[in-house]
Amino acid sequence: MRITRPRVLAVLLAGTALTFSPLGGQATAQLPAEGLSNPCFTPADSAAKGGRGADTRDVSPAEQRQIEARTAQLLKAKAERGIGVPQGALAAATVPVYVHVMRDAAGNGDVTDTQISQQIAVLNKTFAGGESSAAANTGFTFNLAGTFRYNNTQWHQDKQSSTYRKQTRKGGANALNIWLVDFGYLGIATFPWDYKKQPGIDGIRVQYTSLPGGSEPNYNLGETATHEAGHWFGLYHTFQGGCTTTNDEVADTPAQSSPTNGCPTGRDSCSLPGLDPIHNYMDYSYDSCYNQFSPDQSTRISNMWTAYRA
């Protein structure tokens, strides 16, 4: 999750645009991060992305170890049944994407079909490693499976978030649901290992002004969706755990003590080897600073997909 606001680049893909307007009644407002399995880790000495709150539920070091052990067991079991990914290979799939546009009574939040197409294009470009020669091609592509528009001021403000997600979510574990809302975050995401217990809320919530062409300063290139989708695939922030060797469970992203703000070339917040990975989609940099997932992140995405979403 990012506190500034997540983003996504879009690849123009054919998708069926559907319209649905539910009744507008709602109940008590809840905190924006309500219902999350795990808000993003936000060190006390640094604000989250764009100065907003954590975008995933917190994962303690102990739980982090449990998740890694469980993932290894699942991968081994699937491999023994012949349904895993061959040694040395990576999983690859086309992910159906369902976009839920939450409008208020005045029509605020009603992004255009063109913006949605551009957002899908951004996802396709970023996950294909199309923004840098140093970026990994994860092998995953995205296809717009449906666009749904709702008239509900409470939902637009991300109130009753568990309720509206359970009522509107489409598809199975392999489907990425994106709810476009207006809240105090750039985005919020769930992790793949939480799907089995809470399938109804699985997906990412994204500040609607962060889509390509939106009004969010420094975060309107669609890369917030990329960041949040990274969590949805099982990636932590690059600053997960701070200056530790375990860090984000990815060997080729140098440890960093806290989130990046802006695009500070040469930033080095840890005594451990390597400069902070400020261009990595899982940091909190500006959209214009982002340009890559690392090869080891690509491997982790493959493993998490195989374990929890395939």
Image (cartoon, rainbow, N blue to C red):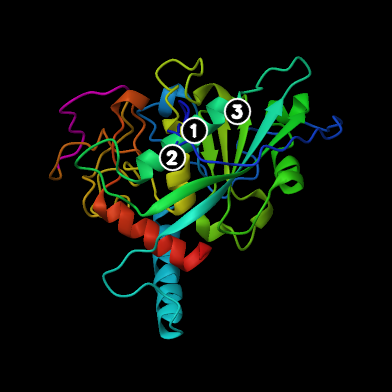
Can you tell which mark lies on residue 123? 2
Whether residue 216 can be seen here? yes
Q: Is 143 in front, or is 274? A: 143
Q: Residue furthest bottom?
A: 80
Tell me if label 3 and label 2 are in contact, CB under 8 Å.
no
Residue beneath disc 1: 119
Q: Is residue 5 magenta?
A: no
**Is residue 42 rendered to the left or right of residue 278?**
right
- Secondary element at image label 3: helix
Q: Is 174 in front, or is 194? A: 174
Residue beneath disc 3: 113
Q: Which residues are magenta?
A: 262-271
Q: Position of residue 138 (x, y in %)?
A: 34, 52
Q: CA distance from mark 3 to mark 2?
A: 15 Å
- Secondary element at image label 2: helix
Q: Position of residue 249 (x, y in %)?
A: 31, 56
Q: CA distance from mark 3 to mark 1?
A: 10 Å
